[in-house]
Image (cartoon, rainbow, N blue to C red):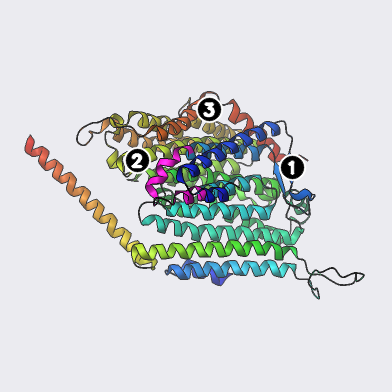
Amino acid sequence: MGAPLCFLLRKEALASAFTVAISFACLGISFGLLEQTMDGQILVYEFGGWPRPFGIEYRIDITNAFVLVVVSLVAAVVFAAGPGQARRAIPVGREYLFYSAALLCLTGLLGVTITGDVFNVFVFMEISSLSSYILIALGRERRALMAAFSYLVMGTIGATFLLIGIGLMYQMTGTLNMVDMAVRLQAVSETRTVLVAVAFVVVGISTKLAVFPLHQWLPNAYSEAPPIVSAFLAATATKVAYYLLIRFSLGLFGAALVFDRIGIDTLLMPLSVLAMFVGSIAAIYQTDFKRLLAYSSIAQIGYMTLGLSLATEAGVAAGLIHLFNHALMKGALFLVAACVTWRMGATKIAMMRGLGQRMPLTMAALVASGLALVGVPGTAGFVSKWALVSAALEQDQLFLAFLIMASSVLAVVYIWRLVEVAYFAEPDGEVERREAPLRLLIPTWILAGMTIWFGLFSDFSVDVAEAAARQLFLGLGGGV
Amino acid sequence: MMIGLYIAISRGNLVKKIMGINIFQASVILLYVSMGKVAGGTAPILIDGRSEIVYSNPVPHVLMLTAIVVGVASTALGLALVVRIKEAYETVEEDEIVALDRAEDAKDLATEAREEAGKAASEGGVA
């Protein structure tokens, strides 16, 4: 929407101001939408006035609106931090292209979330993916190119899988609209075509989401991309993919087909648990701050998919709460990484010695959001882990609850490594207080502050997520 | 479909990988088009007063128009990335690139270790 306009602006200052303005406008609109949908109302916008089976529609219920808020919130904050960062990564005079790509990516992500047409989902997903490949390739080192390339290969294969799945479903139902398709799939849900479609769709989305064995692209992509881009993508792209997984599995196929008949949950649960442990353990061994964060993302995605795999309302609600909270914390942490890069030029953990004295405010943000990642009471991470553990206990899965706790301990280890290096190691050379510029620091603290705010006053995120989960289990047709 | 996927997975040459993906996507496009085909059907152009004509379903074709655009875009972007990779690494073979990255890592580690050793030595000297 805004991207072509941004392309025409050319001047960097104009383009960046425009980007920020657009993203804040999106934030305002999504809050408005969330408010309207909170009472269970579903907003439908038909393109060109064509009614449902023929035209394309935008369809917004609580879940959509919730994800919209998350995405546009992170986008607004991160883009506000963007200007200085972009200048370092890109040749002078070409910055407007960076902003165009960023806005395109935002458009794609919002589009995936909002649309009620399965083919549109694919198109918007490719819009956001293609622009994110560009953004990742802007990284400073040549490895960024390779990271973007392997992401492109994985991403395209994933999207094509999704396309095959959509095609098979279209073949069985003759409609592309999600509501119609959900209704008509009920009648044919026993056929092999639909089962194959489920498999293709789930694998395709899981590739985008970086569910454990399909996560290979993620660490490289996130650690090599420019820091501001990693902050944006880590906090939004996988979240949208997770939303899509929920929407397809619960809304489209229905819980009965996905969980009872095929038993995706019995596959997803061990994979999520593995992701929680493998991601965290890999994070412990990283020598680079951003790489560490990327691996911890894999673990956190494990928590989210675990919520879905519980196949209960409470589980899905916990997944959604974690979606919200994790977007805040990872956004904050990657912005901290951006601050560190700004000062130190790189994010090797060895370089961060004594940073607690050098950049006290930045490191305090690291501690705040790091604690949230661990799940210390009083932070956002605690709220979502609590929800997840109680959802597991509700199903008498004591062992699972224990595993969730145990993997949190691993998070303590890698966060503590950072804190130890930053505060207790002797700094090299003279100690000089040089903070990151305010333009970066303020957005970092907005997100870090929010992780604490939503830890203490979690009503908003929990209420919305629970309402969304309730509506999801009614099924897409149920709410109409 | 499988040929394309196989090429994308098995080949180390980045250009071949992109081409494999392209074949993969093209085959999916054919899958869609084959869905829309009705035996004996013709192009969906309305002709007055002839209700007995069988039409093929145009919707998959329309969808594939978009999918083709997406496919072309990702292929072009992929090839552009390969050009940049070629400039940066002077090779398009995946294993050679991995080897180059590994060598770089080893060099980094070596310099780090040397610096540490140097620092320890100088501190020892002061004490």
Is mark 3 in CB contact (under 8 Å) with mark 2?
no
Q: Position of residue A332 (x, y in %)?
A: 45, 36
Residue A110 position (above or below residue B74):
above
Name the chain under label 3.
A
Mark nearer the viewer, 3 or 2: 2
Q: Which residues are magenta?
A: A80-101
The one nearer the camera, B84 or A162, is B84
For residue A147, side relative to residue A116 (left or right): left
Crowding near pointer 1: few (<14 within 10 Å), some, many (20+)?
some
Q: Residues within 10 Å of mark 3 (few under 14, many from 20)?
A: many
Judging by the rendered image, the residue that carries numbered circle 1 is: A44
Of helix, strand and loop, which one carries label 3?
Answer: helix
Work out how far the residue at label 3 is from the one at label 2, CA to CA, in angstroms. Answer: 28 Å
Horizontal side of residue A285 vs A19, given as left or right: left
Which residue is tagged 3? A454
* Element carrying mark 2: helix
Q: Amino acid at mark 1?
A: Val
Locate residue A77 relative to residue A341 in the image: left or right. Answer: right
Q: Residue at x 49, y 30 (%)?
A: A451
Residue A230 point in image, percent of width and height: 45, 45
Quadrant of the frame with the C terminus of chain A: top right
Q: Nearer the viewer, residue A185 or A158?
A: A158
Q: Answer with mark 1 or mark 2, whichever residue precedes in sequence.
A: 1
What chain letter is assigned to the residue under label 2?
Answer: A
Q: Chain of mark 1?
A: A
Q: Position of residue A101 (x, y in %)?
A: 51, 51
CB under 8 Å between callouts 1 and 3?
Answer: no
How far apart marks 1 and 2 lie (CA) works out to: 44 Å
Q: Which residue is mark 2?
A: A342
Q: Where A213 falls versus A477 (above or below)?
A: below
Q: Residues within 10 Å of mark 2 (few under 14, many from 20)?
A: some
